[in-house]
Amino acid sequence: MTWLVGLCLLPAAGWGVFLFGTPALIVLAVSIAAAILAELASTLPFGRFTLRDGSAFLTGFIVGLLMPAGAPACVPAAASAFAILVVKQSFGGLGRNWMNPAMGGVVFALLSWPGPMSQWIAPKGGAVQGAVMPPLEALRAAMAGPGAKETTPLAILSSSGFTFSDLDSQVLGWINTHVFSPMGISLPPGTFDVLIGHVAGGIGIVSVPLLMLGAWFLLFRGIIRWHLPVMYLGTFAILAAVFGGLGSGNGWFAGGPGFHLFSGSLVLGAFFVAPDPVTSPMTNKGKCIFGIGLGTLTFFLRFFGSLGDGVAASIVLGNCAAPLLDRWTSRRVTGTQGGAA
Amino acid sequence: MTYPTKLPRGGVDPPAETLVPRDSGITNAAVPSRALIPLLQHSGKPALCLVKPGDRVKEGMLIGNADGSRSANVHATIPGIVVEVGEHCLPTGEVCTAVAIELGGEFETSGKPRSRREWESLSRLDLLERIRRAGVVGLGGGSIPTHLKLAIPPGSASSIFVANGVESEPSICADDALLREKPSDIMEGLRICQALLTPARTVIALGEQSEDLVPEFERLVRQKGIKADVAVLPSRYPHGHEQLVLAALGSRSPAGEQSATVLNVATLYAIFEAVILDKPLIERVLTVTGSPVSHPRNLKVRFGMGVRDLLEECGGLSSGAAKIVMGGPMRGVSVDSLDLPVTKVTSGIVAFEGLAARPHAELPCIRCGSCIEACPWNLVPTRLFKLVRIGAAAAAEREGLSSCTECGCCAYSCPSRIPLVAVLRQGKHALRGSDA
């Protein structure tokens, strides 16, 4: 099961390695190796061998996928080791940790090394002009500065001088001329790059279509259930659409939910991390409430916070509530009058 | 025809291996040359032994007398000589007195047509006495002496009476075979129960695999002038359980109230035989199946016949057989000896191949919630399991441990292959121990 989740992440990981080259491969290898070594170091002395369950591998893999390709090797190594040793094994290993190990490791790295955690590498074929930054970071920087008077995230980016690839302008030019101009619509520059993930960012989170491919497989095979991801993404999208524009002074209904769904680690978090059975509620009702909570937290942390894109931090916070949600949502035992819990 | 008003939740869908051909009917198993008849074939107290070694017994003779009301009579299933009365192990692991009979002498009743007795003028007590005398117990799995279920206080009436034809386990199809072979007799049994219970509503509940029998039963209902509905219920395991059948029919009986009665169709047939044919319960229909069995089929078997003889009747086992289970594939008990006898509670015998029987290592619980989805009783099996494992059976009891029917859905659905049922059972034993 765990191995299948890893397999479903491979397309997105492959895209990251293709975009960012050897540094991305090194970051992934280091984070996986560190997780496996930490797992061995914490279980072998007690006579247990737990690598076969795949959870240590998956933790290291997800930590690596969330790292910028330019991060120095010690950062992913420390994040993975923290995830396994502190977050997972100190609570008793697989099944007993209350916080998602990978997210714990990533939050640990974000708090400890904010500088190295933003050493982005320009994607292959992308325009290099000024500082290399993922669109979400660039949007934040632009909105912090004066004169952000555009209404959509992509327009703000363009006016702030953020450049997209030549491929983007070619593809959009063709589509706008042949498909959309008769309808009187024009896609803003950057749409194509953001859509397919041809931008700077975490190694495994830039390509949303490839992540969705893996997610469909997980849903199709019944490894995850739809409740949590749908509630998470839905809540976030609604909140972002309605209130997202308030922060930048654009008023109601101007948040650009599409841009935000395709930026940062939201899709990876919603389909591959938050549904982690160990740290999410067990009941379907609990999963729904959990998803709504995560969507709300991510919205606030992303639009009004400062810790990365808000996904890792909100999952870690949400994990605290999972056992409580299980208790609240357990059903009345058939044939009895009282409550089950 | 009525349809279930409320589809039950929970349960599992194991691969439905109906290896028994639909139209193969019921085969009469050969009379065993030796029968080992335990005196505890029901829930309650064992019957008291009436014979000693050397006694000559006739077919259908009483050999075990019910010990009080929560017990049932046991009869000789073959004519012959009692060769041994001793302690024997039952498939469940319980030890009880069993009577071994060596076949001999002539069959006085078998194969001869029995005259039908009139019953409609009998009093309620006389009817109950006929059923009790014949040693009829629930053949659907509960094995509660049937006269206890039918004895309701005079003047009161049952709100709903259900003839349960939904199979209790996957791959078992003995009830379906009996419904096909003896529909009219089953309906007679139903009429007797109606006379005893005077229910406000009667439902004949059929499983999905018996759906084609609906017109036949509706015809019988009209012909005999019976007030009853025919319903088809989903054949999802374990929804043949009487409480879940009631729930599906939209009539959940509040715990402890005797307003709903559910009897298995095989039990109704036994009631018919007891009351009308004056025949004690000495045989039942059961399913012998599993891929290693050469000719899976439904057989009418006399109690006391050994599993070995029964498997021979079905063409023997292929060499791949690794495990034999008495009962159904989900709740059956794995046997360690082929000499164990078929009893009133044996609804089937299932053989498994090596691959299906192999043991698995238990992995840590990852809180995936599969067991919660599978539990038809809305329990949280993983929580009960963890509480029992740390020795807190009393805390587990507060969360509903005693509502567990050990249907096995949680363990079946667990991806970590945790033996949930075994551990919950230990918890119940621990509770019983602390009560004592």
Image (tube, grey):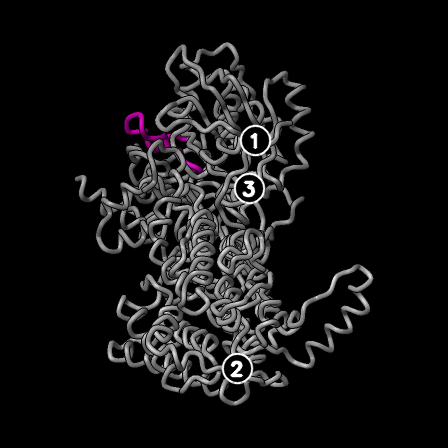
In this rendering, would A91 be left or right of A290?
left
Q: Which mark is residue B5?
A: 1
Q: Secondary structure at mark 2?
A: loop
Q: Are marks 2 and 1 in contact (CB under 8 Å)?
A: no
Query: Is residue B91 visible to us here?
Result: no
Image height of A147 relative to B300, above or below = below
Q: How far separated are the C-alphas under marks 3 and 2? A: 72 Å
Tell me which numbered mark, 1 or 3, is placed earlier along the sequence: 1
Query: Is residue A82 visible to us here?
Result: yes
Horizontal and vertical percent position of residue A63 = 42, 75
Horizontal and vertical percent position of residue A162 = 58, 76
Q: Secondary structure at mark 1?
A: loop
Q: Residues within 10 Å of mark 2 (few under 14, many from 20)?
A: many
The amino acid type of the residue labelled 2 equals: Val
Q: Say which of A182 and B180 sits in front.
A: A182
Task: Locate residue A180: give its quadrant.
Answer: bottom right
Residue at the spot of label 3:
B174
Q: Say which of B367 and B189 sits in front.
A: B367
Which residues are drawn in magenta?
B61-79
